Image: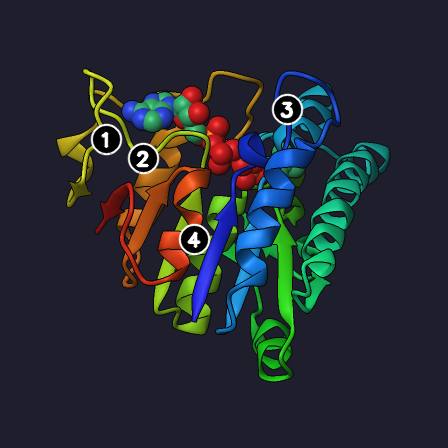
Amino acid sequence: MIVLKLGGSVITDKDSDETVDEERLAALAGALGGYDGELVVVHGGGSFGHPAAAAHGVSRTDGTRSAEGVREVHAAMKRLNDRVVSALAGEGVPAVPVHPFSLAHRSREGELSLPVEGVEASLGEGFVPVLHGDVVVHRDEGATVVSGDELVVSLAEGLGADRVGLCSTVPGVLDDGGEVVPRIGGYDEVAGYLGESESTDVTGGMAAKVRALLDLEAPASVFGPEALEGFLAGEEPGTRIG
Ligand SMILES: Nc1ncnc2c1ncn2[C@@H]1O[C@H](COP(=O)(O)OP(=O)(O)OP(=O)(O)O)[C@@H](O)[C@H]1O
Ligand SMILES: C=C(C)CCOP(=O)(O)O
């Protein structure tokens, strides 16, 4: 079973509000159309969720008690989710939407609880659940952002994924010379090169990704869009983490 994240910066034009990169999304959906194993898809916020979250001052740790703010961020993500689900459906993928706001919450300490039974049942029925970065209720904080990367980690752990893939705009984690680092076993090995995302991103860019993936039991790979087909075929393109 694969848990795959399609980066928000891959499927949207991150510098232009609420704009899908149609060509990219179609190409990725085409690759997924050729896959017939168990699959959970998660996508990021890109130019839908991040500007909305920034406008309401919400991040993974700074919450909002504005119900309107929660609705607006969630609605922006649902608009993107709709586009992703439709693109996948167009390629024959049995994609169904799953909205984390309605499922998950955070404790006072910020720990995410994501019940995965529904997703598991969905897989058993032959569906491909498509989740997305979202807002979630956070005790004592109102609501905070949950990144697609955090969802990937919870899903991979809760469902016992065999492999995890993060399809981003970059061909992998890059070193200070711009070369792809083939394997990362510990955060200290790469801490010096890891930075934030180049565009509006309230959840932390590559540094947060690598930290989260290092805690996983399943092997995880960070790779670019051109390598998705290879990943689905069992290759380990880009950077292997853990
Ligand atoms: N050492 C590094 N190697 C690769 N990318 C890096 C590095 N340091 C910082 N980055 C930035 O991290 C970005 C990837 O993180 P980002 O969070 O934008 O990805 P995403 O998952 O595709 O998008 P989203 O968060 O919207 O879902 C790259 O586009 C790059 O700008
Ligand atoms: C900003 C929101 C609402 C979702 C963020 O998800 P990410 O792009 O995976 O970090």
Measure the alpha-carbon separation of dots 4 and 3. Answer: 22 Å
The earlier-in-sequence mark between 2 and 1 is 2
Q: Which residue is mark 3?
A: 13
Answer yes or no: do the residues labelled 2 and 3 have beta carbons within 8 Å?
A: no
Q: Which residue is mark 2?
A: 172
Q: Which residue is mark 1?
A: 180
Measure the alpha-carbon separation of dots 4 and 2. Answer: 15 Å
Answer yes or no: do the residues labelled 4 and 2 have beta carbons within 8 Å?
A: no
- Front residue of 129/156: it is 129
* Residue 242 % position (x, y): 21, 51
Name the amino acid type tagged 3: Asp
Q: Which residue is mark 4?
A: 229
Answer yes or no: do the residues labelled 4 and 3 have beta carbons within 8 Å?
A: no
Q: Is residue 141 visible?
A: no
Measure the alpha-carbon separation of dots 1 and 4. Answer: 18 Å
State the residue at coordinates (66%, 31%): 21
How packed mark 4 is, by other alpha carbons closer than 10 Å (few <14, some 14-19, many 20 or more), is some
State the residue at coordinates (68%, 65%): 92
Measure the alpha-carbon separation of dots 2 and 1. Answer: 5 Å
Answer yes or no: do the residues labelled 2 and 1 have beta carbons within 8 Å?
A: yes
Secondary structure beneath disc 1? loop
